[in-house]
Image: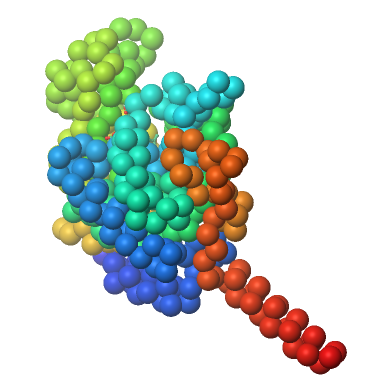
């Protein structure tokens, strides 16, 4: 039985997602902004370079898979998937990465080293926003999750302001209604919320992200969140002593380095680490999705749902058609002297230009 949700579309099978991807690739583009294999002509080895680097990185430091997946989602929610999370602060500007809410983000150096390899192979071609998207989808694949055929062709933005972070980050104690509204601002449904929260099947959270649930749930001390399983609360107290804000704990208590159904099994058993994970049980539709996946015998449906919702998220606020640039270094906008033009790819845009040139030549020939 499929884990359908009233507010979401019917789940597609992995085969259906792959077929849709192939069809869209043949047609050229998903929409005006991004397309499958945007670098096929300009840097055919780009996706292989990212995958090879990510495989080596995760083999050495398995924890970085989760960090890179999260980095991409934070980039998309704050100002769109345009690489703004990677920009460093300057003398006149405090960037997103220096917002106190983003202090825990990790993996910037991985993006920089992948980008250096891409610049050596194809200078000025692959955007930092796409490096983030590809590294995130490879994190999923390498941890035994689905292969996600993510469209590329995003350009990099110039703006990164710490002030944009708070309004575009869900609050740690957000209610389920608040979370659904938050996702709605980005055209993401309650189903996308239930599905994308499944990213917490890999990676870790600092004790600071959930210690209130263990020690200070109400105003009085040593009161824990009653919605959290009592044994799990005791285990977590063992991992995070009161006042310890720095230790990292697996978000999925069942299998923190494998992309599987362990997250849903944990949440369904009142072992969702973050308050926002537990909140999925407080709405009829999101609860139905969680319990259905928790009881599923195979991850195929979750994988297909995740691929579809990931692609939805990867379209937020994309820049294209030279509205952005291809940054040479992901941590800084290009100096004015360097070319800030994105390479022109043969898409609908170029086809229109070609067609109009042809019409002009014919018109000129007729006049002459
Ligand atoms: C429902 C909204 C979400 C909330 C409230 C939320 C919140 C959080 C928090 C508080 C952490 C722990 C950060 C830390 O302590 O360092 C975290 C980690 C993580 N999040 Fe989310 N998140 C949400 C959605 C997402 C989405 C959409 C994705 C990706 C598709 C994602 C992927 C991750 C991953 C992989 C980690 C582990 C990071 C690591 O190991 O470094 N999250 N999230």
Identify the image quadrant of residue 202: top left
Identify the image quadrant of residue 146: bottom left
Camera-side residue of 288 and 204: 204
From what the image shows, is residue 109 above or below residue 237?
below
- Residue 353 image position (x, y, % from top left): 66, 73
Quick one: quadrant of the N terminus?
Answer: bottom left
- Residue 105 image position (x, y, % from top left): 35, 30
Q: Residue at x 46, y 44 (%)?
A: 328
Query: Which residue in the rendered view is the most extreme toward the right?
Result: 367
Relative side of 194 to 273, left or right: right
Relative side of 91 to 47, left or right: right
Relative side of 226 to 316, left or right: left
Query: Which residue in the rendered view is the most extreme toward the top?
Result: 221
From what the image shows, is residue 80 above or below residue 250?
below
Camera-side residue of 226 and 236: 236
Q: Quadrant of ligand 1?
A: top left
Q: Which residue is drawn at 59% across and 22% down?
A: 92
Quick one: quadrant of the C terminus?
Answer: bottom right
Is residue 333 visible in the rendered image? The answer is yes
Q: Which residue is drawn at 79% across and 86% down?
A: 363
Is residue 281 visible in the rendered image? The answer is no
From what the image shows, is residue 41 above or below residue 172?
below
Q: Residue at x 32, y 59 (%)?
A: 47
- Residue 204 image position (x, y, % from top left): 25, 32
């Amino acid at each position: 039985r499929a884990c359908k949700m009233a507010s979401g579309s019917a789940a597609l099978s992995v085969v259906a997602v792959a077929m849709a991807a192939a069809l869209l690739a043949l047609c050229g583009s998903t929409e005006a902004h991004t397309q499958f294999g945007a670098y096929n002509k300009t840097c055919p080895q780009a996706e292989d370079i990212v995958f090879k680097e990510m495989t080596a990185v995760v083999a050495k430091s398995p924890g970085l898979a989760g960090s890179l997946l999260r980095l991409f989602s934070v980039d998309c929610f704050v100002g769109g998937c345009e690489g703004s999370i990677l920009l460093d602060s300057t003398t006149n500007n405090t960037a997103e990465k220096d917002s106190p809410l983003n202090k825990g983000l990790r993996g910037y150096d991985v993006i920089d080293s992948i980008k250096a390899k891409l610049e050596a192979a194809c200078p000025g071609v692959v955007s930092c926003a796409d490096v983030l998207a590809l590294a995130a989808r490879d994190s999923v694949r390498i941890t035994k999750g689905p292969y996600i055929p993510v469209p590329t062709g995003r350009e990099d933005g110039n703006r990164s302001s710490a002030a944009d972070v708070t309004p575009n980050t869900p609050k740690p104690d957000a209610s389920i209604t608040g979370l659904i509204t938050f996702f709605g601002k980005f055209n993401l449904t309650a189903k996308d919320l239930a599905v994308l929260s499944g990213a917490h099947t890999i990676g870790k959270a600092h004790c600071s992200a959930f210690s209130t649930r263990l020690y200070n749930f109400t105003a009085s001390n040593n009161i824990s969140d009653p919605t959290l399983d009592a044994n799990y609360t005791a285990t977590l107290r063992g991992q995070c002593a009161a006042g310890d804000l720095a230790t990292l704990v697996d978000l999925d208590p069942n299998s923190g380095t494998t992309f599987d159904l362990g997250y849903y099994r944990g949440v369904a058993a009142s072992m969702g680490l973050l308050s926002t994970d537990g909140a999925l049980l407080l709405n009829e539709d999101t609860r139905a999705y969680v319990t259905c996946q928790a009881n599923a015998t195979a991850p195929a449906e979750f994988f297909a749902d995740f691929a579809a919702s990931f692609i939805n998220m990867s379209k937020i606020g994309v820049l294209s058609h030279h509205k952005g640039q291809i940054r040479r270094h992901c941590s800084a906008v290009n100096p004015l002297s360097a070319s800030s033009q994105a390479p022109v790819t043969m898409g609908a845009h170029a086809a229109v230009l070609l067609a109009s040139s042809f019409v002009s030549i014919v018109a000129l020939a007729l006049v002459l």
